[in-house]
Image (cartoon, coloured by chain):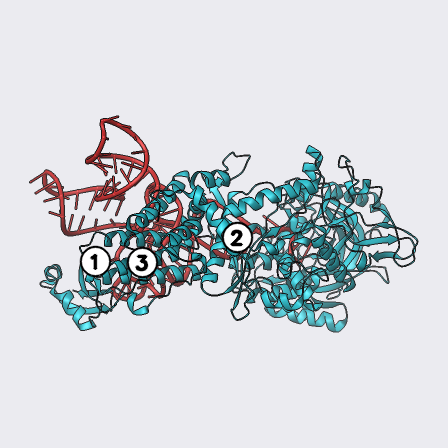
Amino acid sequence: MIEELYFPQKIEKKQRKFWDELKINKTSEDISKPKYYALSMFPYPSGRLHMGHVRNYTITDVIARFKKMQGYNVLHPMGWDSFGLPAENAAIQKGVNPKDWTLKNISYMKEQLNNLGLMYDWDREVTTCLPDYYKWTQYLFQQFYKKGLAYKSEAAVNWCDKCGTVLANEQVIDGKCWRCDNIVEKKYLSQWFLKITDYAQELLDSIDKLDGWGENVKLMQKNWIGKSQGTTIDFKVKGEKNLSVKVYTTRPDTVYGVTYLVVAPEYKDIEKLTTEENKEAVETYRKNAKRLTEIERLSTAREKTGVKLGTYVINPFNGEEVPLYAADYALVEYGTGAVMAVPAHDERDFAFAKKYNLPLKVVIQNPENPSDCKTEAFTDDGILINSGEFDGLNNVEAKEKITQKATKEGYGNAQTQYRLRDWLISRQRYWGAPIPVVYCENCGIQLVPEDQLPVLLPEDVDFSVVGRSPITTSKTFIDTTCPKCGKKAKRETDTMDTFMCSSWYYLRYCDPKNEKKPFDKELVDKYMNVDQYVGGIEHAILHLLYSRFVTKALRDMGFLNSDEPFKNLLTQGMVLKDGSKMSKSKGNTVDPDEIFENYGADTARLFILSDSPPQRDFDWSDAGVEGCYKFLNRVWKLYYQNQNKISLDYKIDFNNLSKDSDKLVRLTNIAIKKITSDIEHEFQFNTVISKYREYVNSICDYLNVEEIDNNVLSYALITLLKLMSPVCVHMTDELYQNLGGKGSIHKLEWPKYDENLTQMSDITLVVMINGKLRDKITVSSQANEDELKNKALESPKVKDFILGKTIVKTIVVPKKLVNIVIK
RNA sequence: GCCCUUGUGGCGGAAUCGGUAGACGCGUUGGACUUAAAAUCCAAUGGGGCUAAUUACCUCGUACCAGUUCAAGUCUGGUCAAGGGCACCA
């Protein structure tokens, strides 16, 4: 029996308990079925779910359930990206242990996820902050080290003072810390890096193979890798035998226009290149440059500054002597740290030359519109002049010829440059996976032996220290012995960037309990790649680039066969309220718990998918939630009122149906087709849900016809339940069981449609005259072109219009329209 | 500055191939039911015009300007606006 009132608070709990008993969320090991790996980006356990989580996980859940009904063996796991600074801050502010704080949050959020009715196989849960996981993060770090892909090096690194740690380049947004918006400074420190640059070319090349990724994300990654083709050229220092300055340029075609050279203030040979009388000025300039923050330094609006070094270099192409400058518009970490300056053909050089009254030499010209470059640089393509043997060549050709000459004569080379830098993974924080190395006075850097992993986080730490990592306060952690010589050694106190933990978790889900290795190759090869990955656009570079790198590196170490981790990527839009992003500071958040309590999870799921396509931003409205709740009540009532007419064993004689019944059968097939294809193509859940509503309207219309066929009604209502079951998971199962269904609706097959029935028997024919709509007439869908044309001409309205005119031609689009062109 | 994306009613958004613009919903207005309200149900809802009024009909309309076509929200060229990414990367 179906009860009169829809009461989600009661039925949702009941259904979830039922599913637990049936174990329907467990990943099937049935190898006869094709696999489908559906994955949401796992959350940081900050305390409670927010609506962004709800949207993300509902999208993936509906996909997983849909695929399961289509007969796939679905892997749909969940876990926790649980290392990170907020836990440590909570420890500092509230005096709680980061581990306790994190685990408490996990347990609360896990309950919330369950309340949302998500189909997770919790047997595969991974928690990155627990030793059974971070043991393998450490192990993988060691594999990278052994392979030469992890190294320690002194470098200028990004430092966030507020977080008290260094950051990777990818974590600096507009010169600010990605987490706290604090302005990032440069520091010289010895840190651990992963050699992502070794994979720059492959990471770039295989972007084009990622058909299931949005163009915007692919482009962002391409820009981030930032490949450029150029040439290096050696400029010998005048009067010095063994000293030269090597520049990198993408415009070798302008080399005859060089009037000075610029090196970065941090350039390695700068002291050797400075004459005695300029020493003091150069030193002052370098000190000032160091003081600038990244933001100030990178501001293109800032006036260019520099200082003369006093020495001269010789242009190998024409023997000209040009002066050498230090200027902070040259970057030490890109190219060679030195630039040849061509003020006539580069805007930056032009601005600098104007300021310091440096000469300018035009070497490229547009013959049709020659410019003397007195007011601005000419940066377009053109023909070479004043360039010796290369005069008259177009500059694109000249690039190649000039590079060839430099190579032949031994003072230059073609070179490829990337903007991508190596991934800095050291963090001066406590709550992360300790980097598993020790430093021995005799033996230097030593890996902690594998059988001693994991290197556990110490518990005896003082979180109140300022200016250093809390881990350094441990009395038991730091001092140890060298695994090689047995003498005294010190442990590394830095922990790993949490992005390291999250760059391989999707592999661990394939084999989450393995105690002998991070994962079994066979199992990973069985489930990988992730068929559908769903998450926020904010990870377009960070997490997605790191994961791609880690997958490729592990492939080369023989851990797996995949080239790419994520076959299809859906980047969902933000959840907004009143036009701006939900945030605590704005006070426009909506707590999922409240929605579950007042309306139930099915309403929340329905609403979060209903109004916008998943890729776009979604504006939360209380009225919209209310509307979805009303719709569910309406559906409930439909089943309540007709329960006596519904039978699960309906039989339909398709050849012998009344007109109305035939219509409903056709509308049912149309609904199945439309909903199936909207889910399959781009996951357009908003149109799926509008089709639910339209289809419900059609069924209600049928209930008003004279002769209701209970078999046809049953067919329609059971089909509706199945179509809605991936979204409204609790309600559909409750109704199904109350109608006498055995087991759970979620074990049923996805409904199929008959192509012949996806079209109405009568269609509306649009009649146009000169492209304007003039009449609509109902015709049989079987009518041929001539019949359509004749019907159109018979229309009284059409007759009025064509009276006294000549018909020039008639266009007939079968099953759609007739357009009559008259004069 | 360079690159990308997006511009459709009061709002969210529909509209496989160029073929009825505004599906579906929110909101609003009117009505039914009710002592009243809520809930529910019914109807109307892009602008303008015509009409005493209804049915009907005409006309304009998918950021703007042009073009291709029997036919353009959709294709081409240009302009503008918003959002995003990159940015002294030589």
- Spatial separation of the CA atoms under disc 2 and disc 1: 58 Å
What amino acid is found at the position of numbered circle 2 in the picture?
Asp
Chain drawn red in the picture: B
A42 or A310: nearer the eye?
A42
Q: Earlier in the sequence, mark 2 or mark 1?
A: 2
Residue at the image point whose x is 60% and y is 65% from the top? A564
Element type at marker 1?
strand
- Spatial separation of the CA atoms under disc 3 and disc 2: 27 Å
Q: Position of residue A89 (x, y in %)?
A: 68, 38
- Spatial separation of the CA atoms under disc 3 and disc 1: 45 Å
Residue at the image point whose x is 77% and y is 54% from the top? A454
Instruction: Provide the residue designation for mark 2.
Output: A20
A513 or A370: nearer the eye?
A513
Mark 2 or 1, closer to the camera: 2
- Mark linked to residue A507: none
Instruction: Provide the residue designation for mark 1.
Output: A773
- Mark linked to residue A647: 3
Q: Colour of chain A?
A: cyan
Q: Is residue A317 above or below residue A602?
A: below
Question: Quick one: label 1, few (<14), some, or many (20+) residues within 10 Å?
Answer: few
What amino acid is found at the position of numbered circle 3 in the picture?
Ser
For mark 2, name the chain. A
Element type at marker 3?
loop
Q: Is residue A223 above or below residue A401?
A: above
A472 or A638: nearer the eye?
A638
Element type at marker 2?
helix
Q: Do the dots labelled 2 and 1 sit on one chain? A: yes
Q: Position of residue A806 (x, y in %)?
A: 13, 67
